[in-house]
Image (tube, rainbow, N blue to C red):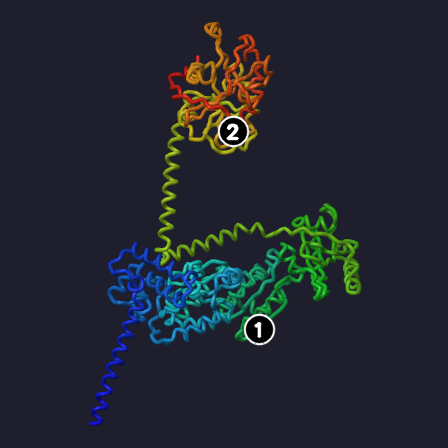
Amino acid sequence: MARRTRMCLTFPGIVVVCLLLLVGLVETANEVDPYNILGVTKSASQTEIKKVYKRLARKWHPDKNKNEGAEDMFIKITKSYEILSNEERRANYDRYGQTDDTQPYGHGHYGHGHDQFYFDESFFHFPFSSKGSQEFADSKYALHFNQYVNDVVPDSFKRPYLIKITSDWCFSCIHIEPVWKEVVLELEALGVGIGVVDVGYERRLANHLGAHRTPSILGVINGKVTFFHYAVVKEHLRQFVEDLLPQRLVEKVTDRNDLQFLNSWHEQNKPHVLLFDQVPVVPLLYKLTAFAYKAYVQFGYVDQGLSDTANLLKQFNINTYAPTMLVFKESVDKPADIIQAKGMKKQVIDEFILNNKFLLVPRLVNQKLFDELCPVKQFHRRRKYCVLLITGDEESYTIGNQAFLSFAYTNTQEVVRFAYVYQRLQQPLCDTLLKTKDSTQPPQVLILERRNAAGKVLYKEVAGGWNGTDKNKQRLLDELQRLQKDPSILNQDAMLPELNNEFASMFLIRWIYTAYDYLTEIIDDVLHNNCRREMMPLLSLIFSALFILFGTVVVQAFSDSSEDGKSKPKAKDGATAENGSPGSSSTSSRPPKKNFVEVTELTDITYTSNLVKLRPGHMNVVLVLTDASKNVLLSKFAKEVYSFTGSLTLHFSFLNLDKHSAWMETLLEFAQDAMQIDTDEDDGARHKIDYTGYILALNGHKKYLCLFRPVYTGEEGPGGATGGGRRSGSREDHPPRRSMPRSRSTATLQIHHKLDRLGLWMERLMEGTLPRYYIPAWPGLEKITAPK
């Protein structure tokens, strides 16, 4: 009975436990229910979901909401929006109740979608503690935005970086953790940089990298980001890092091209390193080393298994049972240094390269090399001196240059570095040190010490020049021995200019290689679904802009060709001031780069394009002349308006009164009342107004004009002009006095004085202070009379 009672008492406890477990499961399901988190229904549209997400994101953003659970809630909101904003993931959740985090591992979705990469199905078992599994990466390799910009990007020019994008909610990240850990341990030992970005804490950095999903893996080299799109297995990740490296880092060397490779030291101004090994492909460690020291050393690889490398193996007595590395400097027959070891480590190779990163006597080809060879004096370090040979690259200097090299071989010291410059290529430096611009003088040797980074040096010129004789060598040796005892023998000082970059001409080649790499990356990215979706808006915008631009160009081309076709028969009528070159269309909007002014004749052919259909904001400045005054007025007109030809909105033309006087009279009749043009009512039938020297500034779009008129000689002196002289009280601001007789009109002006004050009038035109006289419409073509 008692036993039965105990069983009855335990039964309610079992029920309670089951209920608690059920409630926990329901709460867990609700936690990852994106509809519940965002508070939307399953029928909600994308617009509604986006609107709710923005509202909740502003409310729960950790920077604005300081509550304890705000950050977790913000992550849930972001994760829910990522699911519902993607139609494929939303449909997957609606059908199976699965998000990316709850989807069974090894599901085919990852194998075919290629959204980021797919997982190898052999990795089914993984620990369930996300914190414990990711502690390896998060604690040591976590990246922040400032750290990436300030450290990783500059360092990526010396070594590639492999970066994983993850988050606390990413259970799929746990799936790839064993592979990631194994790859990191291997690649980091080879010199590859490693980084981990947690989206929950570094959303800004993830967006900067273009990583919008977790997990993602990407590589960074030379500041460029490349995404990994394949199965997360060790071999694929290793190959991905190798593919990031440039293709021309290491040259394959055989018996056929060994001399060509080694003899290029003089042209490239670098030591050359040869690695002998039995594997047919270049080891990744060697490629990474070549990338790290590409600015200092040229690398080559010899495959010992090939038959056409036998002579090299015999010549340098290479042991085929262990990798061997030789470094060659100025001598191609004998290596300057050698190492040989099985399982060669990165630290050993780095030390070997650093000890041989310069030639024995390198040529100073840029400022960076000068700074490294001849460093600035530091107070806590020993003095370092540079022995500099100023010579030439002609064949006559070869003997002296070889003698200087042999002297450096026999007198190498820790505190003395030897270098040379070609005077023709580094003329400013040589002029400063030699204090002469005579490039024909014999080679000179100087001993110098740099005092500061600004360029100050102390130096001494070795007497007698340098011809490579034994006497020259002994004199230089004596000076170096004196220098060790008394540094004050460097009794001259100078401020050196920055060295010319002699390899700057190779910029175009490097640019072509860079463009090729970027094009390859773009093509690779477009082939994957995720990049295609992200790039579609940008591609759509680009193609729309190109379509609009193309349509505009086509329409403009057809319009210009039709107008040019009409103007060809009378192209000879165009006149060019100053030198008589053929006139060009005044519709050109480019600032002139010539020493003359282009002026087009206003005729019935150019009338529409140069006036009626003139673009808004543009004005045509028209000179009125006759056949008799054409040459004189055009020359004067060009001199007065030349300083204004840089304006994109001004065009210049001339109107021949002998041909088109009717149009001129009709135009001024429209504005005669407003402009109060002088006419003599008594003599009007006998005397006709002389419009020679008038200037019309015509705004074809707004239908107004400004007028320049020569002023009478007797009253206002030669060169007076309406609107061009006095700023106040001009004849266009007030009605003119009619006291001047016709005999003292503009007809009495000498022709070359009529445009004297045109420059001042043009200034007021550009300022917009001239009176404007509007007309109802431009006179039609029928008002333009045919030439007689």
Q: Residue at x 68, y 48 (%)?
A: 428
**Mark 2 surroundings within 10 Å by alpha-carbon count, few (fewer than 14), some (14 through 19), many (20 or more):** few
Residue 306 visible somewhere in the drawing = no
Q: Position of residue 695 (x, y in %)?
A: 50, 20
Which residue is disc 1 drawn over?
340
Instruction: Say above or below: 345 vs 784.
Output: below
* Circle count: 2
**Which quadrant of the figure contains the C terminus?**
top left
**Which one is in front, 767 or 293?**
767
**Which one is in front, 495 or 286?**
495
Q: Position of residue 99 (x, y in %)?
A: 30, 66
**Mark 1 surroundings within 10 Å by alpha-carbon count, few (fewer than 14), some (14 through 19), many (20 or more):** some
Instruction: Say above or below: 715 vs 596.
Output: above
SS at mark 2 in the image: helix
**Which one is in front, 215 or 147?**
147
Mark number displayed over residue 766: 2
Q: Residue at x 36, y 42 (%)?
A: 547
Q: Residue at x 48, y 14 (%)?
A: 677
